[in-house]
Amino acid sequence: MPGPKDIDGSVGVPTFYGAELRWQREQAGMTQQQLVDGSFYGYSHLSEIERG
């Protein structure tokens, strides 16, 4: 799986929010699956949010 691409948060609010969510998740040392397990969202939805 390729690494995450850099997202320009200045493009818009959803893009900024997604980039911030991904950054916070990575700082916490969590995978997307771990975050999904503690939420009401599915994996694909979380992925879409992080991509903005």
Image (cartoon, rainbow, N blue to C red):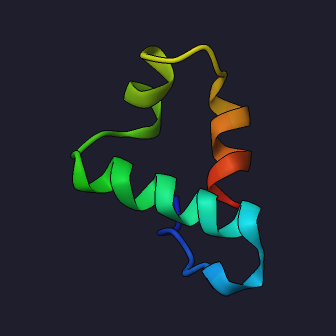
Q: Is residue 14 above or below residue 38?
A: below
Q: How many marks?
A: 0
Residue 44 screen position, x and y as percent: 71, 34
User: Which sits in the foreground, 41 or 4?
Assistant: 41
Image position of 6 with respect to 24: above or below: below
Q: Residue at x 77, y 75 (%)?
A: 12
Residue 26 sits in quarter: bottom left
Residue 47, image quadrant: top right
Q: Please tell me which residue lies in front, 47 or 11.
A: 11
In the rendered view, would you say 37 is above or below 44? above
Residue at position x 61%, y 78% in the image: 7
Residue placed farthest to the front in the image? 13
- Left/right placement of residue 51 relative to residue 27 reads right
Task: Name the side, left or right, on which 50 lies relative to 12.
Answer: left
Task: Give the residue displayed 37% in from the left and 26% down from the top.
Answer: 34
* Quadrant of the frame with the C terminus: bottom right
Is 9 positioned to the left or the right of 23 in the image?
right
Q: Residue at x 47, y 56 (%)?
A: 22
- Horizontal relation, residue 52 to residue 19: left or right: right
